[in-house]
Image (cartoon, grey):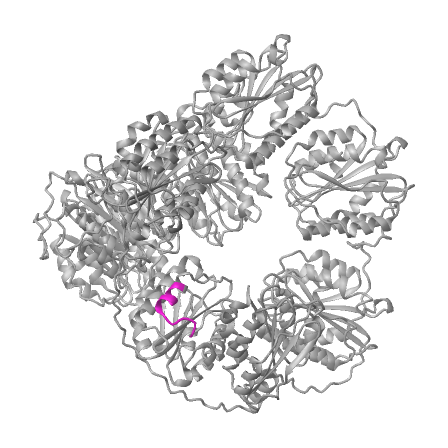
Amino acid sequence: QILVLITAGRSKDNVGRGAEAVRQAGIVPIAIGAKSADTSEMQQITSDPDSVLILRDFKELSTVRQQLLSKVGAVFVIEELIPPIEVVPEEVDRKDIVFLIDGSAAIGNVNFIHIREFITRLIDKLDIGRNGVQVGLAQYSDGVKTECYLNSYSTKSQLVNHLKGLKVKGGRTVKTGAALDYILGNHFTKDAGSRKDEGVPQILVLLTGAKSVDLVRSPATALKRAAVMIFAIGARKADPAQLSVIANDPSLVFRVKDFNSLPQLQQQVWATLSTLPPSQPTTEQPIVTSKQVLPKVLGKKDIVFLIDASDNVRNADFRHVRDFIAWILGNLGLGRDGVQVGLVQYSNYAETEFYLNTYSSEDEIVSHMQGLRQRGGMPLNTGAALDYVLTNHFSRSSGSRKNDGVPQILVLIMAGRSRDYPRHSADALKRAAVTVVVVGTRDTDPAQVKEIASQPSLSHNVEEFRSLPNVQDQLLVSLSTLPAARETTHQQPTVPIRPAGANKRDIVFLIDGSDNVGPTNVQFVREFLTSIIENLDIGSDTVQIGLVQYSNYAETEFYLNTYSSEDEIMSHVEGLRLRGGTTLSTGAALDYVLRNHFTKSSGSRKGTGVPQLLILITAGRSRDHIKPSADALKQAAITIFAIRTGNADPEQITEAASDPSLVFSVTEFRSLPHVLERVMTPLATLTVTQVPTEIPTVPSKQVLPDEENKRDIVFLIDGSNSIGQTDFSFIRDFLASIIQNLNIGSDGIQVGLVQYSTYADTEFYLNSYLSKAEMLSHIRGLRLKGGTRINTGAALDYVYRYHFINSAGSRKQNGVPQILVILTGGRSNDDIKPPADTMKRAAIMNIAIGVRNADSVQLEGIAVDPSLVFSSNTFSSLPNIEEELTTLLLTLPALRAIPEPTAPTKQVIPDASKRDIMFLIDGSNNVGNTNDQFVRDFLTSIIENLDIGRDSAQVGLVQYSNYAETEFYLNTYSSEDELLSHVKGLRLRGGTSLNTGAALQYVLQYHLTPSAGSRKEEGVPQVLVVITAGRSGDDITRPADALIQANVFTVVITAKNADPLELQEMLIDPGLVFSVQEFSSLPDVQEQLMISLSTLAAPTVIHKKPTVITEKHTDKITEVLSSTDSRRDIVFLIDESDFVGNSNLPPVRELISAIIERLDIGSDRVRVGLVLYGNKAETEFYLNTYSKKDEILSVLRSLTFQGGRTLNTGKALEFVLRYHFTRSSGSRREDGVPQVLVLITGGRSGDDVKRAADALKQSNVITLTVGSGSADPAQLKEIAFKPNLGFSVRDFYSLPSLQEQVITSIQKLHLQTVPSQVTTAVPIEVPLVTTTKARKRDIIFLIDGTSGMGRSIRQVREFLMEIIPELDIGPEKDLVALVQYSSDSRVEFYLNTFSTGDEVLNAIKRIQLKLGRPLKTGAALDFTTRNVFIPAAGSRRDAGAAQILVLITAGRSVDHVGPAAEAVRQAGIVPILIGAKSADTSEMQQITSDPDSVFALSDFRELQSLRQQLLTKFQPVPVIEETIAPTKVVPKEMSERDIVFLIDGSDNIGNANLPHVRDFMIRIIQYLAIGRDKVQVGLAQYSDDAEAEFHLNTYSTETELLSHIKDLRLRGGAKANTGSALDFATKYYFNGYSGSRINENVPQFLLLITGGRSSDDVEEAADALKRAAVMTVAIGVRNADPAQLEEMAIDPSLVFIVNEFHSLPDVLNGLITPLTMLSVPTVIIEEPTATPEEELVITTEVPRVKRKSMRDIVFLIDGSSSMGRSFILVREFLIKIIEEFDIGPDEDQVAVVQYSSDARLEFGLNVHSTKNELLSAVKRLRFKTGRLHNTGAALE
């Protein structure tokens, strides 16, 4: 019985009853909703989230057709056979029993059946009835759902029927505490059927399978106090400690391993339940008390509640606040002669809800409270709100009875730190005899809470709003006992803002009014000024205020003597508007203030001894010198305060301020309130002579001797998702504040920064920034990295390897202290001990800061000493530890390196210590994970006994299985510590085969070479130590001979299955073979090996010229470069898309760095450029940007990839040719210097590459290509200058193996002649055009029309009038348009407006300046591209006309120009930029990407000098005509197959390994002939449950498949239920509805890829697949269980195992053969013979499943006005669905009902018995119409 509901809106009636009736009737509901349909309502109807299909519009119905058919096809009739149990009537007292069951998604459908059966069997033994046992039932996860109340059912059959229809609720989290609270309030009540008042025992039975994420103690205690007896039953991940807390007694706690074991508890629970005496209420005071528990607050009191209603408080939290106040009010004696109450809510401003005298009765107040709504808003101005309450509520007119001696009380409830300065306002309340009680929660500052409260005992803090009841009693006691406070009108506030005799001040504010501040921040500036002014005693005889704003010049807002009252000043400040401007002249502004404001005529009282104060607020770097002007002010006895934010230069600000203690920094304007108190104190206390000369107490500025002042500090910060954007801003501010106090420089303190989550990413190295300003600029732009896991151990290792090293700027060898500061907000998922210990031994001082969920034990393990561990509850509290941390950073002495405690004494190898020793170790499965520790320990012991160094022993390491992989080269590490650190982190790569011969060849070719560190030519012995555990699968004879010929001493250590005789072939001395039985015995041969290593002498080296084998080519032979000319221009073009990703950045960077290290870099030798690309290309640096190797390597170290899903290699090649191989960019092509392009990519290009590749060849650019991952080898060869210059590697970590080949290729290249096969030139570069009248052009002039241009518009106009006559204006020649812009754009005339030169000139003469602010160049570029470069406006691009844009600007844009500039380039428009005045050169270069097309002038009067250059630029603009080359499709011969990929989407794989899985699937698909009549592919992924990605009939082309797979994202999850996933595949994939051709005898394959052991049973589901003739191939990685894999695979030969995901390609060959060759298997289904006992188990435990071919399907269709015209789409959808059914009396029957306010039967199930009749009836359906939408009634 199936019901399909199709609805367009939310029901007006309650659907619960109707939905329940549907379930009770055994009907399976499926709901489809669009438009205004309510998802939660549909889920309530179906009880199964998977049966709800949500669409935006009914036009999308076709997209759910397959899902609906799958759902309908998967419905079975399940007949539950509950074994007959002989019920022995028991004498059971009356009981009220509520079952509370965990219904979260983690339980799953299978386990839910076990829970259902357990409860059913208990109920079966109970005497159910109104006078017997009553049962209630609720499910919970993150919320609670009542299934039935105690009084819902009065018979056992009703209860059991309800249970049979019960479906798991679903939900991610388990909140048991909230559920217990809900049960007490909603089930154990009289209304819900509780008979507690009659003395009936109240019992709660909790069944849960997970640990609660919220607190359980408080709600459990409340239940116990209410005399409820609690049973706690836990399974799976339930927390035993929580269960014990919940249950009344340990005897009422029951535990089973899994829910299928619940029957074991049946008798035990029943026995306890039947003998349980009635529970007595506890005598303890309950947490939630009734009004009668505490005495009412008697006597007269005036109480005002001031509540935080800002965005800090969520809607759910606001309800807690409302309930809290309501409870308090219920315990007050309210009335005119008793307690009066007022209420105010606030955020950025305060708002009265009601006054003290508004209501006189409790009912009125409660009614108001029930309708209370949160007002919201940010920021939180608590100080202003306190002022508001004092002024507007504690007054006689508002009901205050203060003058009658009635106590005045304010209760403040706040949830965040105040943005303003609340202390003075709180002091004012205290002086006014108002007692302030404060309750702080969540992000409040505890210090601020205490500061506001009248006394410490009146400040209360709770972690969350739901914990407010914890302070109810304390608060009520305080309110009832507080006496009236005494008024202290003459008492001074704590901070002496207006001290006696020092209240006269002349204060001038000088504020940055430029675009650096901008309209978004002006409000913060206004609020800051207002906060300061409010705290001053304004008046002509007290404090006078002046205000100036400035940008390129200064402008007075008002003078010191303009206003004499606070109201006047406030009014002006509130209306303040910033003047704008792109440049900042702070020096000139300081001069202006001195000359025009600090004068007698402007109100200055300097002559009478009044302190003169200037407060400078700036957000940018000044373009002029400020020191002379600042010195002049200081000499005039004016004290300067300097507040900096944004891009202000710290050095300039320090110069400006009178003293460093008067410099205040914030990262952004919204943080200005953070410095308010620090500004106010000196502002209020400084006198004329009291200018501080001493350094402030923060120890950051203490002068240290040079050698002590040096520090190398690396900050390692947690950038995982657990931090979040809000808290990350606190981390950013914290870092900026610390660095602000450090003496940054190459001779002072160096700082590095790394962010980490799953893996670590460098932000900058120790030597990246040598100025504080650059460093702070980077930190301000810092963005949260993101990531689901916190791998602190891996991050520590990363920092140690890549930051505390010489090349990254470490000065460890010079004795400079090395310090690491780690800041984390969570527990690490990996082991931190080994890397932490390594760092301690390396004399690195680790300081650990933990916030929130950080593990204190882990922090202590990381820190070098427990005293160096800091903890903070919240990130907003980080400033509390700033001072102490800064002191430590500046005073900690350098540590001494600690040697390994277990390291044996080194054996001194006599003067034979120079050795080059290569270790080649077997990393295959022959060794395995159990033995890798023995190998590591052995290598460690050997290295510890060598004298490591550049002039002594060097060590390299390679591991191998089917192929070899470099760990490190001979010259990678020069110290023992570095080597040991790498070895300790060594992981074996795995692999099933062993190719020792290939590995020997690899070592000889890539390691025992000078470039890799070999010193063979200096006579240093070359030693190879081979450690192997298996017989080689390839020939070792030839590589062994080559090693002997090369005089390499080989030492072999064999274990396990290795063949010593085979390996003797490679030895110079057969006695150098050492054998051990097991790897644990390796130490037995250590001494023999050490003797061999120490005594081997260097052999005689025979110098021979190597034989070079050259290939013959039909084109001209490349000349070999002479040794006298090593010049090269080399551009690296690097793929930064997701095909490579940041996880593969290290090997890419390593390869490029290694190549550059080998090149002779210099402006007259080798030049290097770098471009990154994905969807578009971006320049990192040009050929002429850097001339030093160190500079280039420094840039590479800080390189990061932006990512992106698309890869346009063709466009990137064009970009490089157009913008890099040009003279202006440093190319020396015209001087005959070879031009080389090195392309490194990880994916197949999404655009055409041939055209651009041919253009590069035509231009004599020699392209080398390096591909990995999904790169297409054919495409790489097509791009490469010659096929032999195209290189491929299996994965990016194998890139170093190409190093030698690439370098050799670059060294041998010389200027090439074009290969003969390239016959046509491609016009990407500059074609030769001899005259400006050679072709038609569309030229648009885009002119800056802002006031920044001003009178210069005349010079622009004159310039245009000189250019136009040089053009050939005409319909088939040149056309011109002109656009002016400021904040918006205005077309002066279009391309097709004028057709003659004279008309254009006349129009230009009439041009007037547009005016307007600000300058939005990005918007103007976008406007011009969309509205002027179009055919309707006269553009002739389609007719081949060149498209040229000439931008003339006078300033920097306030918007972002990048996207619009990219759109210009994408549209084939060539931009030329002319800028003067305040135009920004870098911005102009960003628009054009061609430095030669940017003309920067100091003034527009210089335009005339550009005339000829501009005309020349017009000449060489080509039109690139895209030619689509026909693609040759090579048909793949293959028979029909249906292949479903089922991939483990849990944390077993993780996002780091997803690219390997994606790549593996892509490679398989590329082998297959995809098509409807060939191979069909489906995909599903799973963790705790399964999810369809696409079905077998979803896609019919390879392109569609690959596109989906490339965008694949893992669903995540801690568990992998492979059994359930196999079952899911059987039901939803291998059937006709999903596209399976199983009935047509097409072979069916399931490819399972998993990374771990299944959490559930796989046997039954695997057998079902085998019986269905589905051939399962099982691929296991990492922790997959081989036994389980064999159980699932159809044959053991179809089980494939690899150690790591990057090794998946190793099984491709073995996998493709069965996929393409196997036919449908013969499946023999044996009927099992069961013993009587087994039969009993089957009938009692397992439900019998009968698949029925008959189905009754009713479509219930929304016919209300919400559906409207979409009814036609629904009708068409029904027709398509019905066509898929087998209609007939004994097959499928269909009925249709339409509904709105009422329901109408269109036709019943038995009306139409053929498909044709049914389709005709559906086609005749007409829309019902009707306004109301009663889904509940329709369901009934």
- Residue 1294: x and y, percent? 28, 55
Q: Residue at x 83, y 37 (%)?
A: 482
- Residue 1036: x and y, percent? 17, 63
Residue 1741 appears in the figure: yes
Q: How many marks?
A: 0
Q: Is residue 504 above or below residue 281?
A: above
Q: Judge whether residue 1513 is colored magenta.
A: no
Left or right: 76 in relation to 1124: right
- Residue 573: x and y, percent? 63, 28
Instruction: Tell me which corner region of the image, top left, top right, bottom left or bottom right, holds residue 1535.
Output: bottom left
Q: Nearer the viewer, residue 1273 or 1415?
A: 1415
Q: Residue at x 45, y 61 (%)?
A: 1609
Q: Residue at x 19, y 37 (%)?
A: 1165
Instruction: Tell me which corner region of the image, top left, top right, bottom left or bottom right, holds residue 816.
Output: top left
Q: Judge whether residue 1595 is colored magenta.
A: yes
Q: Is residue 1086 above or below residue 1228?
A: below
Residue 929 appears in the figure: no
- Residue 839: x and y, percent? 41, 43
Left or right: 495 in relation to 1767: right
Q: Quadrant of the C terminus?
A: bottom right
Q: Nearer the viewer, residue 1755 or 1394?
A: 1394
> What residue span does the magenta drawing correspond to?
1593-1603
Q: Quadrant of the N terminus?
A: bottom right
Q: Nearer the viewer, residue 1409 or 1644?
A: 1409
Of all residues, the one furthest to the top in this rendering is 607
Left or right: 1437 in relation to 300: left
Q: Is residue 472 above or below residue 646?
A: below
Q: Nearer the viewer, residue 936 or 1392?
A: 1392
